[in-house]
Amino acid sequence: MVFALSLFCVGCYSRTYVAQSVDSPDKQLRCSVTVYSAYRHAYTERTQKEVWVWIGSGSGNDAKQLFEHKYIISGPDVGWKTFWLSTEAVNIDLFDCGEGVYSHEVGKPGVASNHIATLSFHLKKQTGKFTDEK
């Protein structure tokens, strides 16, 4: 009985995530985006998603964080495109394709997407950190 209960609870807290990192033009910085589905829901369901944005340099134990923040958005299969405008500015366009259309299909003929938001980040030279432009 205890074994069955523990198996049931393990599934209660699962969720899916999708992640991608894009290097700056000079390859010195990286912008990483990770989008998490709601607990106990498929990523493709229309639910609230956590969008984590991390900007920094290096990796592993040598990573230096210059920005990190969590945003909450709603949508089915949420996708994004990361655009470095320069080594000091990066934009992230968030979109979904509606129910039953998957984000990896964007760009195919006849597949439109719904723009959710554009997140913009700029390096503040005074602090050496990135900030989000609201």
Image (cartoon, rainbow, N blue to C red):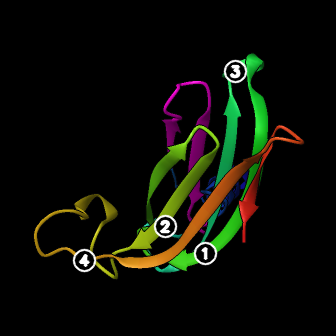
Q: Does residue 109 appear left or right of residue 126 in this picture?
A: left
- How far, Cα to Cα, is label 3 from label 2? 27 Å
- How far, Cα to Cα, is label 1 from label 4? 19 Å
Q: Secondary structure at mark 4?
A: loop
Tags 1 and 3 touching, CB below 8 Å: no
Check disc 3 and report the residue beneath it. Answer: 60
Position in image of residue 54 (x %, y %): 68, 45
Residue 86 vs 75, above or below: the answer is above
Give, as a single range, the part of the protein colored magenta.
Answer: 19-40
Check disc 4 and report the residue beneath it. Answer: 112
Mark 1 crowdedness (10 Å alpha carbons): few <14, some 14-19, many ≥20: some
Query: Which residue lies most toward the left here?
Result: 109
- In percent of the image, x 34 and y 81: which residue is there? 98
Mark 3 crowdedness (10 Å alpha carbons): few <14, some 14-19, many ≥20: few
Q: Earlier in the sequence, mark 1 or mark 3?
A: 3
- In percent of the image, x 33 and y 64: which residue is there? 103
The nearer-to-camera label among 3 and 2 is 2
**Location of residue 72 by image quarter:** bottom right
Examine the structure image and report whether residue 21 is included in the region drawn in magenta: yes
Check disc 2 and report the residue beneath it. Answer: 94
Check disc 1 and report the residue beneath it. Answer: 73
